Amino acid sequence: MGFHEGLGLETTPKDHIMGGSAEVGLFSDKLQFRTIYVRGGERGSSLGISTEPIQKKGNVLGFLLTSNFFENKLVTEAEIDTSRFDPDTSDEFLAKRDKAYRIKLGGTIKDYTYEALYEYIGRDYEVIGNPGLSKDKQGYAFKAGGTLFKVHLLNLSFSSITIMLKKMISIRGLIPPRARSIIPLASLRAFPSLSVTRGPC
């Protein structure tokens, strides 16, 4: 998505891409609002079907709201983007519209950190100049970690993501061997990722 990983525009001299952004901060920048708009066109490959290159055209509008009111104990992000993209302006089909949004919250409390994320990217969500953008997916993830008894580092994560109707579940954890005598779960030491892939129901 535009704000999270950057628009990732890969342009050439034949591309015509322009845009702008604006940002405002409130309450000593503890609450920030940002918007970005990009539009333009580019020439793509016709895959040998025609000698004329395909003209692509599109635009994307994004909004991002972030907050940090409790000295990093609770940091939030909320983003929504909408796109309009036509992969071939010479055909009879209209441009497709779609959306993407992301909500994240996390923070640091003493020696512990946490993060929760939900993300959705529509099947027809496209950003002009970034054909490799991941799309048609949705999922959530949780992460937590910290120093156990001020000695041992503990990290746990869980995620469930559906990409093109395939669901992938991942569980990761890292518990140092020295923590075995403290908590029963530590007997797992470091357990690898557990991935489960499911097709459409």
Image (tube, rainbow, N blue to C red):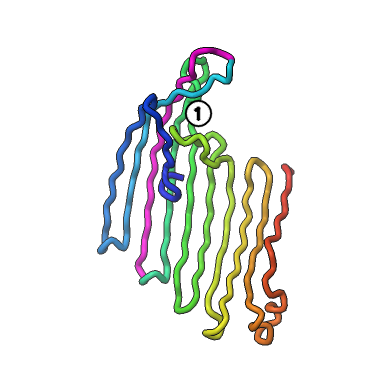
Q: Quadrant of the C terminus?
A: top right
Left or right position of 58 against 168: left
Q: Please check the rendered image and state whether residue 129 is part of the magenta-colored stretch, yes or no.
A: no
Q: Residue at x 46, y 24 (%)?
A: 56
Using the image as rendered, state which of residue 78 and residue 141 is in the foreground.
141
Q: Residue furthest top?
A: 51
Using the image as rendered, state which of residue 114 and residue 128 is in the foreground.
128
Vertical placement of residue 66 versus 63, above or below: below
Q: Residue at x 50, y 25 (%)?
A: 87
Q: Residue furthest front?
A: 13
Q: Residue at x 68, y 45 (%)?
A: 166
Q: Residue at x 40, y 32 (%)?
A: 11
Image location of residue 61, percent across then percent down = 39, 38
Give the residue number, with chain letter if any, for mark 1: 96
Vertical placement of residue 184 versus 90, above or below: below
Q: Secondary structure at mark 1?
A: strand
Image location of residue 28, percent across then percent down = 25, 63
Image location of residue 187, percent across then percent down = 72, 78
Within-10-Å neighbours for mark 1: few <14, some 14–19, many 20+: some
User: What range of the chain is rendered magenta?
Assistant: 49-70
Callout 1 amino acid: Lys
Q: Please check the rendered image and state whether residue 55 is part of the magenta-colored stretch, yes or no.
A: yes
Q: Main secondary structure of the magenta part?
A: strand
Image location of residue 93, percent across then percent down = 52, 19
Total numbered labels placed on residues in the image: 1
